[in-house]
Image (cartoon, rainbow, N blue to C red):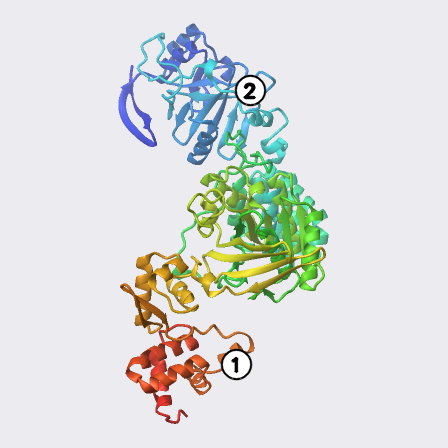
Amino acid sequence: MTRPLVNITTTREVYIMTETKQDPTFWAAPELATADYPVFPLGGKAPAVEGGFYAATTDHSEIAAWIEAGFGDCDIGMATGQVSGVVVIEADSPTRRDEMEHQVGPPHVITRRGAHWYFKHPRDGKVVSRSVATNLDCKGDGGYVAVPPSTNKTWNAASGLADLPCIGKSTKSTSGIPDKNELPELPAKLREELRPGRSANGSHPEGGYDVGDLLQMEVSAIIARHVKVLPSGKRHAHLKHLCGVLLRRGVAHESAERMLIKAWQLAEGDLAARAPKEVPNTLRTTAAAIAEGNATGVPNLEELSPGLAAELEAALSKEDPVLVEDQTSSSGPADLLYIEKSTKSATKLELVRFARRPSPPPQQFIIPDLVPRHHPTTLYGWSGTAKSTIALYLAMCIAGGREEFFGYEVMVHGPVIYLDFELDADGQQNRAERLAAGMGIAVPDDLMYIAARGVRTNEAIGFALAACAEHEVVLGILDSLGPAMVGDMSAAKDVIGFHNNYIAPFKAVGATPLLVDHQARQQAGEGYQSKGAFGSAYKEHLSRSLIQVEAGDRSTEENTLNIRLRHKKTNFGVLCEPFDVTLQFSEKAITATVRDLTPADRAQETTLNSKDRVIAALEDGPAYPDELVESTGLARSTVKNTVNALKRAGVVEITGEVRGQMEQVQLVAPVALPIKGGAASAAEDLTPGQRIIALLRDPPGWLSDQLKLCREESERYFEPTCAAISRAVFEDSHHAEEVAPVLQAHLEQEPLY
């Protein structure tokens, strides 16, 4: 007797479904018995014979008797654990299947929703059959599993034995049955977690799984943000529903208690005092209500705190445990992959229509354009460039209430944490005290330090995040990324994972991460400016601002070091112009003095456009095109095109000097620097027309000479003079048309008002 089936096979990720006439499923059982897998009939998902999975056998005569008794159409079950010597891990979703394949390789069985992996039983005690994570189950001692060719189960043909000779004439495909002698060992971490009396992540079975310290802090901060805005009369009900949400999700009782107590402490006020008693009591009563089927949860929580349940799910899903060893290597002493490592997305997907959302607030900055708030900034450079000193100086400006950081306004002040993976407290305190002496201040009380050298990264950052939330930290400095990095710095997936798991949580606690990093080595023919941070390009891609530090002149006699800060990337503001800082070191003080670049320095800066570099080169005097190529480092064709564009704009003119076929060029007038200080405030009170008039009434030397030329030869010099005045007033030459009537009136000595 045959019956129609839908047979599912796979080619890569494409399922091919064909309808064929095949023998009853259980007719394939003898082949499994021949391969030493004890089997029994399944009626749906439950055993179909007396004795259940304890009746599983490899005896062909018993199997034949079951078929003769009418169990031929049943699916095939296999007993797991000591009896078969097999432990099976079942992934019941595409996501879990992908995770397991990444960790342990191809599965032995492909199912409709996921896959199964077969492992040798360790024979060192009982392996508990239970759920190890959402959509991930273990079938060990006291368990069983449906095996191919049962409904929606097929062997992965990439592994196992070829077809075996067997009793009967089954047409069911059993190619791919794995050889039990070749099954892999059960991963050590997973084996330990599946011992009797333990549950996922080491918690007790009745309590669910533990949440890692780092994630606990992130969840507490999320909850605190919502609790702070609740009316006091609704906070207990809110807590009750929160308990329901966490416990129903499988969070261990102790983890839930720690997160909720911390959340109420972060919310401050009377909640902080009530938390140690009220939270445990509410958790106990909620757990009892869950046991009776009466607990509240997401729907009720959504009424009090819209969106909180979704935020919690997005955060907690990051640590759904995958209890297998990762075979990838780890660089440095910072960390090893640990049991709560996430392979899930940290953000819950949702469809957003911008037209229906309120406008978000503008991007905030700690330092305008240089350091965007709540987003990572990377400060990097070669060894000996004083990048850690610059990072600490920034920390002291923010924590010490200084108004400026090297001429840039400090827009946000507050506590700063310096998380140090390289030095110790003595070394950094010495540097902080010398910087403070050079700044003329005491070391700020809001500057906090964590020595993390030799500490696992997840522990160090978890501790730092807790401190950030507790002290409302503005800036968190991580120095440096090399020793802290978990994984291979040259591997994009490791860098992306590090940012997602360790850097992104700083935003959740209100802090801005500043990453101090090392620069890649220069190869032959490479310039310093062209180099990025060492490792994968994703280090730079995932930072929202990049600042390169380059060491310049060093004087051993004066104990000075000149360094240049070069803004190489920004996602939110505009690129800042490079600037130099002179550091002077003494036994008791470190002073930092900022200075503008010389024209020759500006001409060589690749962060500036070609127009600004050519103008900078010409500020030192007239030059021929080949001299501009040498002084700027630009290509000859670029110099030629830039000079022609500047001629048309009236900024550059020929001097009349010729060398071969090259014409010497010069600036029409010296380029005025932007007005600074009090003069800038006064100028901002004038209209553009009034600023032009003020400049003409009290012209600087260059403009006096230019006005004289205009009166003598207006046709030739009028337009270039308009362009020069436009640059002096508007900082570009695009407003020459606005200047023209005012200049014409001045030249004709007409009253201007």
Locate residue 237, reporting x and y percent. 62, 52
Query: Tag 2, which secondary structure?
Result: loop
User: Does residue 299 appear in this view?
Assistant: no
Horizontal arrangement in the rendering, residue 76 relative to residue 440 (left or right): left
Q: Residues within 10 Å of mark 1 (few under 14, many from 20)?
A: few
User: Does residue 684 appear in this view?
Assistant: yes
Does residue 206 lie above or below 148 as drawn? below
The residue closer to the viewer here, 432 or 259, is 432
In the picture of the structure, the residue carrying the numbered disc 1 is 682
Locate residue 682, reporting x and y percent. 52, 81
- Amino acid type assigned to the residue bearing label 2 in the image: Asp
The residue located at (27%, 26%) in the rendering is: 18
Alpha carbons under labels 2 and 1: distance apart:
84 Å
Q: Earlier in the sequence, mark 2 or mark 1?
A: 2
Horizontal arrangement in the rendering, residue 13 relative to residue 39 (left or right): left
Q: Which mark is residue 516?
A: none
Q: Do the CB atoms of the residues marked 2 and 1 lie less than 8 Å apart?
A: no
The residue closer to the viewer here, 473 or 120, is 473
In the picture of the structure, the residue carrying the numbered disc 2 is 141
Mark toward the viewer: 2 or 1: 1
Locate residue 638, reporting x and y percent. 32, 59
The residue located at (69%, 60%) in the rendering is: 436
The residue closer to the viewer here, 88 or 575, is 575
Quadrant occupied by the N terminus = top left
The residue closer to the viewer here, 658 or 599, is 658
- Amino acid type assigned to the residue bearing label 1 in the image: Ala
Does residue 370 lie above or below 49 as drawn? below
Quarter of the rendering containing residue 337:
top right
Q: Residues within 10 Å of mark 2 (few under 14, many from 20)?
A: many
Locate residue 198, reporting x and y percent. 62, 28
